[in-house]
Amino acid sequence: MAVSRSITPAVSRAPTPFHHSSSSLSTFPKTHNPSHLFRTITISTTPNFPRDSRISTSVSGIWDAITGGAGSSREALIAIRRGMVLFRQGDVPGSVTEFDNAIKLDPRQKAYLWQRGLSLYYLDRFEEGAEQFRIDVAQNPNDTEESIWCFLCEAQLYGAIEARKRFLQVGRDPRPVMREAYNMFKDGGDPEKLVDTISKGRESEFFYASLYAGLYYESQNEADKAKVHLVASCKSPYGERSDDYMASLAKVHCLCRNWEL
């Protein structure tokens, strides 16, 4: 991803559509529409990581230099990276500890910590997770996946019908599979149709279709059907080989549900 939505030092996802892959990025990153200029620094420990392989810094760094806050910003970014590593290793509570520490070090980070929202979901802290995603979408009103994850949290709190009334409207995602997934969650739909439609597409498309089909079934309290698709996403070529944070998430999901892969 070459661009980020962040105007403060924050881990961000890459915004190049999956059909515009580059030599250094995986083929299925997200899209963001930034409103400020910044520079990016690649985290060398997580190459080919489409959703968050880059740390963005901005003109806020000038303010840090003036106020002496640059050290705290750097420490916050290190904490975020540690949290991401812990999540990928299956230590979800440890990841939240690191993400919360990052916010203490640099409160500006909270508006961009979608990774924290994902971890909160798996700790059944749904109200906090929904708040995190709503804050994130307020910063980036074109974030399809965070809108969906907010729905997933609120479906656990209020049920799918009420959560759909509260659904966050966002801009058009450039990825066809995510547009279909977004509409499915927003209006109701058939996860099987989503997967069937994408089954002959790219590996990344099949992974994301299976992932969100499984998550949709979970929001409807259909655990058996959710398991079929979440396990399929993990066992897909993209799920097995990709460094995508969401490929790690699919495995963490199965681990948290005690599903064998």
Image (cartoon, rainbow, N blue to C red):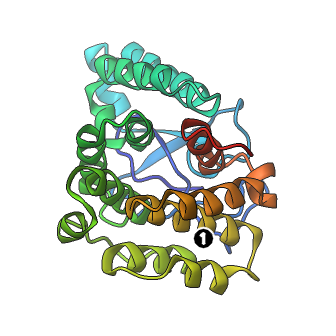
Q: Does residue 234 lie above or below 225 as drawn?
A: above
At 29% from the left and 18% from the top, the residue drawn is 104
Residue type at numbered disc 1:
Ala
Q: Quadrant of residue 254?
A: top right
Q: Does residue 93 lie above or below 29 as drawn?
A: above
At 37% from the left and 17% from the top, the residue drawn is 101
Q: Residue 6: image x %, image y %?
A: 38, 46
**On the picture, is 3 further left or further right than 150?**
right
Q: Residue 172: image x %, image y %?
A: 40, 78
Which image quarter is the N terminus in? bottom right
Q: Does residue 235 lie above or below 6 as drawn?
A: below
* Residue pointed to by mark 1: 209
Q: Residue 59: image x %, image y %?
A: 35, 38
Q: Is residue 17 visible?
A: no
At 33% from the left and 33% from the top, the residue drawn is 109
**Crowd tier of the residue under label 1, counting other residues whose Cα lies within 10 Å: few below 14, some 14–19, many 20 or above:** many
Count how many numbered circles sit on residues in the image.
1
Q: Is residue 23 visible?
A: yes
Q: Nearer the viewer, residue 38 or 50?
A: 50
At mark 1, the secondary structure is: helix
Q: Quadrant of residue 144?
A: bottom left
Q: Quadrant of residue 196?
A: bottom right
Q: Residue 206: image x %, image y %?
A: 69, 71
**On the picture, is 206 further left or further right than 13?**
right
Q: Nearer the viewer, residue 50 or 193?
A: 193
**On the picture, is 194 further left or further right than 6?**
right
Q: Nearer the viewer, residue 170 or 92?
A: 92
At 49% from the left and 19% from the top, the residue drawn is 94
